[in-house]
Image: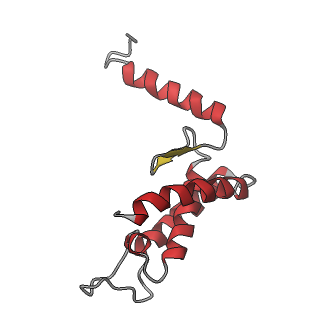
Amino acid sequence: MTGLADELLPELLALAVPLEIERQAGAEPQVRIDYARSRWERFQQYGGKGDKSAAGARLTGGAVLVTGGKGSGEEFTILAQVLGALAHQPGGVTAFGHHWCANHAECEEAAAAARAVLREPEGGERT
């Protein structure tokens, strides 16, 4: 990312992702995971509407979002939806300098468990 996208994208996501977290709150965990997966696949495939770079290459996987081309609004929405779904996972999600989690207590527990595993030597004894 360069210039304006560097500054605006994180701040716009800081507004949009909490809305997605709330919107997806009632969904079953597997439904959210499947939703995030399908939206991420769409994000990676974006550019199917004929979006091209100045060099004529197809823009995909966030390039339209960063360059501000046709469809950048849809790519932004998809990214916010995926991050919103991931925020419901244990440990939440960190991206673009922000951390989002649906349940901060569970997030802290997951982080502590991960740190404990990382401190565990191969023999299974903790240090």
Q: Going by the image, does 38 lie left or right of 2?
A: right
Q: Vertical placement of 109 versus 56: above or below?
A: above
Q: Which of the 4 quarters of the picture holds residue 91?
A: top right
Relative to 63, does residue 82 appear above or below in the rendering? Answer: above
Q: Which residue lies furthest to the left in this view?
A: 55
Report the residue at 51% width, 62% height from top: 37
In the rendered structure, the answer to whether residue 30 lies left or right of residue 54 reads: right
Q: Quadrant of residue 34?
A: bottom right
**Residue 126 appears in which quarter of the rendering?**
top left
Q: Residue at x 48, y 76 (%)?
A: 72
Q: Which of 56 and 4 is in front in this view?
A: 4
How many marks can you see? 0
Tell me residue 8's x, y (percent): 49, 61
Where is the N terminus found, in terms of image quarters? bottom left
Q: Which residue is more in the foreground, 124 or 60? A: 60
Q: In which quarter of the image is the C terminus?
A: top left
Taking the spot 51% from the left edge, 30% from the top edge, the residue there is 111
Where is residue 38? Give x, y as percent. Answer: 53, 67
Horizontal and vertical percent position of residue 57? 27, 83
Say whether residue 127 is left or right of residue 82.
left
Q: Which residue is at a point 39% across and 85% down the rendered structure image?
A: 51
Q: Is residue 64 above or below residue 19?
A: below
Would residue 3 appear left or right of 35 to someone viewing this image? left
**Residue positioned most to the right:** 26
56 relative to 12, above or below: below
Q: How is the image coloured?
A: secondary structure
